[in-house]
């Protein structure tokens, strides 16, 4: 909370002094707050500069935000509670449109019909509420991926793992060999901290092992079953073995830091880490690859649907200009720039055929089906309760990873808490 208050104070100071400096020079001052992971912030700044070149009467201020989606949501809610006009355009998670819809404009009232058809239909549907209002424009899409060291697989005569059991085995083999000369080496890094990122990892474990998606689209809670218990017990066994003991405090950038230093055989992360991996001196670009995540023994790979969108605040003093900015940010030129510069997956299908995008990110063509068929979190069926539901999931799972309780007990508590929260029935996937 202290960190959040300090961040809010710093943002207020930036806004106060920034607006004071530009009011005399520009007709309109807009502010966008967006992501900070990888090169999201830098590419958002470049996008703002692109917009200002075409609209010299508008000044766009880009504000930084926390890496953690949970902390970012708390920051947003503080602005909304105050009905603050200080932020015009918000970058919002794919799971937030239902929870935050009351604070954003219906973009159809500002001409969104001209733009929506170019985007993935399922993302537009995700961003549309039951009243047919478009809460946000697609900004970039995401899906969990497996990063692997090609050179180390070759060195130890191994293939890309297709199951979680294979990943565990192969990571152990490579770890044993590399630790002989590198005590900092790890087998597998991922996101184990108690936050939304852990929920995304767990969804991939459960769904890929035929254990369901926590809550079905029909509103049935499916967490308590042997397949999910099996996956939780396996993942808990990774902690302090093929994964560092501190994995239970890792978020995306913590995992990437170890991978980026050349100290991991495998990493679960989002596509943004691809372009950054090309920049490391720890291994050559040809020495790593990207693949679908593993599956359970009888399951299919599952990648959590991620991604972010741009929405316009109900409290903006310049709604028409802010909507125009949102449409520009979600457009072809900006999405192409962000794809080529930062491996941020476009929401425009045709960009997956663009030569420049594919030259920078060959995996986008190879894994196109992964992005199209990614598994959504149960945010639609839970609505306003999603954040609380996710908190239940990652809190109970985290207690298993840290050894505070066993997997079966955690799943039993998870089921009871989700039922108390939602009132949904209990069943099997």
Image (cartoon, grey):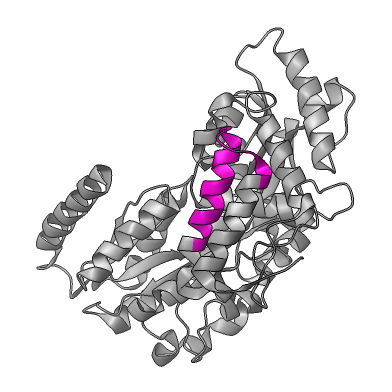
Residue 231 rendering spot, x and y as whole percentages: 74, 44
Front residue of this view, candidates 65 and 45: 65
Quadrant of the image occupied by residue 104: bottom left
The structure residue drawn at horizontal position 52% and vertical position 77%, both measured from the top left corner, is 127
Residue 27 rendering spot, x and y as whole percentages: 18, 75
The structure residue drawn at horizontal position 64% and vertical position 39%, both measured from the top left corner, is 406
Label tally:
0
Q: Quick one: which residue is furthest to the top in this view?
A: 181
Front residue of this view, candidates 386 and 332: 386
The structure residue drawn at horizontal position 85% and vertical position 25%, both measured from the top left corner, is 154
Q: Is residue 111 above or below residue 43?
A: below
Q: Quadrant of the C terminus?
A: bottom right
Question: Is residue 200 visible in the rendered structure shown here?
Answer: yes
Quadrant of the image occupied by residue 146: top right
Please tell me whether the stretch drawn in magenta is mainly helix, strand or loop: helix
The structure residue drawn at horizontal position 73% and vertical position 15%, both measured from the top left corner, is 178
Question: Is residue 191 visible in the rendered structure shown here?
Answer: no
Q: Is residue 310 above or below residue 105?
A: above
Q: Is residue 395 one of those drawn in magenta?
A: yes
Front residue of this view, candidates 140 and 58: 140
Task: Classify residue 178 as left or right of residue 257.
Answer: right
Residue 408 rendering spot, x and y as whole percentages: 68, 46
Task: Classify residue 222 as left or right of residue 251.
Answer: right
Task: Classify residue 59 as left or right of residue 212.
Answer: left
Q: Is residue 320 one of those drawn in magenta?
A: no
Q: Which residues are magenta?
A: 389-408
Q: Is residue 105 above or below residue 423?
A: below
């Amino acid at each position: 909370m202290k960190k959040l208050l300090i961040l809010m104070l710093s943002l207020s100071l930036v806004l106060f002094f920034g607006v004071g400096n530009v009011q005399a020079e520009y007709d309109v001052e807009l502010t966008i707050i967006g992501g900070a992971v990888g090169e999201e912030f830098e590419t958002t700044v470049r996008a703002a500069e692109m917009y200002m070149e075409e609209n010299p009467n508008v000044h766009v201020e880009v504000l930084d935000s926390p890496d953690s989606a949970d902390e970012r949501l708390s920051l947003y809610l503080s602005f909304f509670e105050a009905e603050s006009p200080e932020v015009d355009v918000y970058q919002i998670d794919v799971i937030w449109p239902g929870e935050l819809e009351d604070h954003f404009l219906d973009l159809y009232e500002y001409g969104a019909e001209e733009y929506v058809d170019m985007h993935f239909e399922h993302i537009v549907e995700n961003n549309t509420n039951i009243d047919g209002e478009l809460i946000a424009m697609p900004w970039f899409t995401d899906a969990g991926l497996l990063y692997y060291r090609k050179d180390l697989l070759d060195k130890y005569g191994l293939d890309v793992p297709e199951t979680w059991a294979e990943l565990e085995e192969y990571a152990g083999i490579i770890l044993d060999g590399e630790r002989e000369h590198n005590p900092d080496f790890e087998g597998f890094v991922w996101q184990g901290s108690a936050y939304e990122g852990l929920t995304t990892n767990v969804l991939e474990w459960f769904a890929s092992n035929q254990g369901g998606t926590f809550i079905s689209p029909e509103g049935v809670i499916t967490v308590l079953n042997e397949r999910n218990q099996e996956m939780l017990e396996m993942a808990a066994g990774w902690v302090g073995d093929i994964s560092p003991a501190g994995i239970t405090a890792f978020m995306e950038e913590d995992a990437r830091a170890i991978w980026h230093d050349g100290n991991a055989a495998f990493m679960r992360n989002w596509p943004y880490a691809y372009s950054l991996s090309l920049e490391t001196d720890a291994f050559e670009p040809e020495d790593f690859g990207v693949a679908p995540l593993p599956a359970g023994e009888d399951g299919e790979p599952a990648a959590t649907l991620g991604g972010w969108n741009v929405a316009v605040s109900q409290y903006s003093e310049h709604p028409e200009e802010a909507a125009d900015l949102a449409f520009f940010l979600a457009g072809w030129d900006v999405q192409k720039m962000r794809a080529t510069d930062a491996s941020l997956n476009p929401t425009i299908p045709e960009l997956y055929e663009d030569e420049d995008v594919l030259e920078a990110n060959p995996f986008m063509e190879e894994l196109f089906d992964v992005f199209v068929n990614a598994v959504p979190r149960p945010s639609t069926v839970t609505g306003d309760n999603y954040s609380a539901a996710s908190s239940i999931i990652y809190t109970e799972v985290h207690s298993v990873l840290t050894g505070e309780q066993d997997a079966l007990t955690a799943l039993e508590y998870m089921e009871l808490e989700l039922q108390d929260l939602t009132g949904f029935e209990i069943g099997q996937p």
